Amino acid sequence: MNIASFAPLAVVLPILGAALTFLLIRYPRAQRAVSIALLTLTLLLECSLLASVWEGGTVAVNIGGWMPPWGIVLVVDQFSSLMLVVSSAVSLAVLIYATGQGMADGDRDAPVSIFHPTYLILVAGVSNAFLSGDLFNLYVGFEILLTASYVLITLGGTGPRIRAGVTYVVVSVVSSVLFLIAIAMIYGATGTINMADLAIKLGDLDQGTRTLLHVMLLVAFGIKAAVFPLSFWLPDSYPTAPAPVTAVFAGLLTKVGVYAMVRTETLLFPGDALNAPLMVAALLTMVVGILGALAQSDIKRLLSFTLVSHIGYMVFGLAMSTVAGLGAAVFYVAHHITIQTSLFLVTGLIERRGGSSSMDRVAGLAKLSPVLGVLFFIPAMNLAGIPPFSGFLGKLGLLQAGVELGTPLAYALVIGGVLTSLLTLLAIARVWNRAFWRKPEDAEHPDPVLLAAPEDSATGDRAGRTNVTLLPRTMVGSTLGLVVFGVALTVFAGPLFKVADQSAQEMLDRSSYIQAVLGEDAPVPPVPQAARPDQQQGGGK
Amino acid sequence: MSVNLTLLTVMGALYACGIYLILERSLTRVLLGLMLLANATNLLILTTGGYAGLAPIFDKDIPAGDYNDPLPQALILTSIVISFAVTAFMLGIIYRTWVLARQDEIQDDAEDRRVAETPSFDAEDDSVIPVETSEFPLAMIGSDGARVADTDTAIGAGSSTGSSTAAVMSGDRPVRADQAASEEQPGSLNVDPSPEGGGK
């Protein structure tokens, strides 16, 4: 009995937690304890999954005893288990942050008790999407997480949130419909929706049909991942949600889209002709996204634009379809989930301490709260790719892979990547200069909270009390934990890169995935000819 | 694989109407559009099963080709349930929009409009600062502050009110800093940033 056969628990435990917290809706304290305990348990399980897959290779679990091409399969390989661990760690940190915020705001009077069940359902959906071995189950995973996210993004039902929620819901539903159409067409063309089975059968289709199916899937996932021409919904809808919700959305939801794109590209349509368009999309995502970020004056919106921009790096690594490129992309996904989430959490703290997240209204935070300065500075430098942080290592890996590939388009992307990195630094430096370094009086419309603070600190005991309510220890602590986790990614970048490279190799090879699902004697189709010149070029130089 | 032409035509009509409707600005129409799209997709899945055959209950005497394909129907069932949930949620949102704003239309993003209307001007970098900003202004101009007052009037920011008056450019007109604060205050739209508590 392999530990990996307990993989379904990664989905079942959060759903169980959702049911329990729903029952405990009148007992906020018990609700918190249950959800944190179950999420911790899930995280531990997923860590052991990663360890067991690292030792013993890919494992497929047949649900309900139906054999693979017909029944539902959950597949644990290195990439999916790595994603599971990172996503659960991040969601645990965000959950603790959210409980801290709820307790500080005195939610005993007016608890939004639906938060915990919904949040756990979201985690279950994310895990299901990562583990799923067939396309329809992937669709169901997406729908679980999206429906939970609809509730979370409109939490409280204030005017701006409803407005942002409408955009988000409509765009998500349209992308889901596109995904479902793609599934129907794939089923019509091949008669199967099991991904391992599809990897074999899609190769027999003629090129035109293959390209059509490929484009359908990429567009559907592109909307979810916010790749450039399909990214405009994101900065519009994310910033209005509560800080922890925005943080978990920014960290996880777009990455699930990226994960689905990686699976499509490597498992279903390897070596297809769409690498060049993907590279162009990656370039435009990076550059247009970061130019949008420079125009913003609200920190949350600015971070949303950097989120879009950095999706471009992952798509770049994916589009190269070499081991080096894909490995760097996997590393970058893990890094970016952590960093982007911690930045949004810090912005939530900025909003509490400074009264607003608009750079016109907040200033002088470095003096008011040095802790906040440190918490913002580390992930910010990490995002901009300043050595020695993991952002730098990930970008370096991508750029090296790009240079190794050596095509003119790859060089264009390398230049675009460096430019985007510099512009990210500029955007982040603007936040730092305006929100942290200048005096509160210099702000265009200083927030009353800021101006009140110095007087408070003059009278010693009042300052102490203000600080406690403004920056609760649980919130600062969980943010600190996530920032430390981000730094740990830098410290352990060596082993992590090893996991990333190995999972990239596994994905490009495809044989371990297909054989784990369909049995040892399943035929593994060779990678189509179109991919060969690229790969040889990549390996040769 | 042969395809049922009637189903195909109906599906095409549903897609066309659905796409037309989600491009409308009224939320109820958008919702109707989404429902049509979901149903059109269900029909598409149904057609991938081919012509209707026998109920898929196994019998030794019937050749495999005569059965209906049960999988598309299972998929449709799931997708109907999902679109039901989404429809219910959308109805809730539409009702909430009606309660809040008394209208059934998609609202503009205020912050987006504000950013779009911002001129290519950064108050931090580009504003005219008539006041002497060096660390020792009084040492250089003496104790009366006359030069400071002169530059102050030069930009037309009102009568000389001493060296403390800074000017902020708002759009393309100069506004005194102490008045600028009382102008429209853009900023966070969040009335309530808490996920758990403090909801109304």
Image (cartoon, helix red, strand yellow):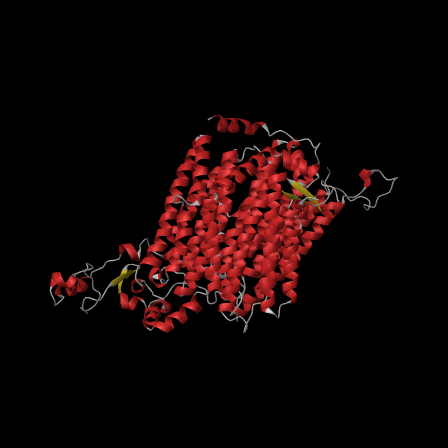
Q: Is residue B57 or residue A383 the one in the foreground?
A: A383
Question: How many tags in the picture?
Answer: 0
Q: x%, y% of residue B94? A: 57, 64
Q: x%, y% of residue A315? A: 50, 41
Q: Is residue A47 or residue B161 the one in the foreground?
A: A47
Q: Is residue A327 above or below residue B104?
A: above
Left or right: where B66 falls relative to A477: right
Residue at the spot 50% in from the left edge and 42% down from the top edge: A331
Q: Quadrant of residue A166?
A: bottom right
Q: Is residue A161 or residue A448 the one in the foreground?
A: A448
| Residue B105 seen in render | no
- The quadrant the N terminus of chain A occupies is top right
Q: Is residue A250 above or below residue B139?
A: above
| Residue B143 seen in render | yes
Q: x%, y% of residue A345? A: 46, 58
Left or right: where A127 falls relative to B58: left
Residue at the spot 40% in from the left edge and 51% down from the top edge: A378
Q: x%, y% of residue A252? A: 53, 51
Q: Is residue A331 above or below residue A540?
A: below
Q: Is residue A532 or residue A166 the one in the foreground?
A: A532
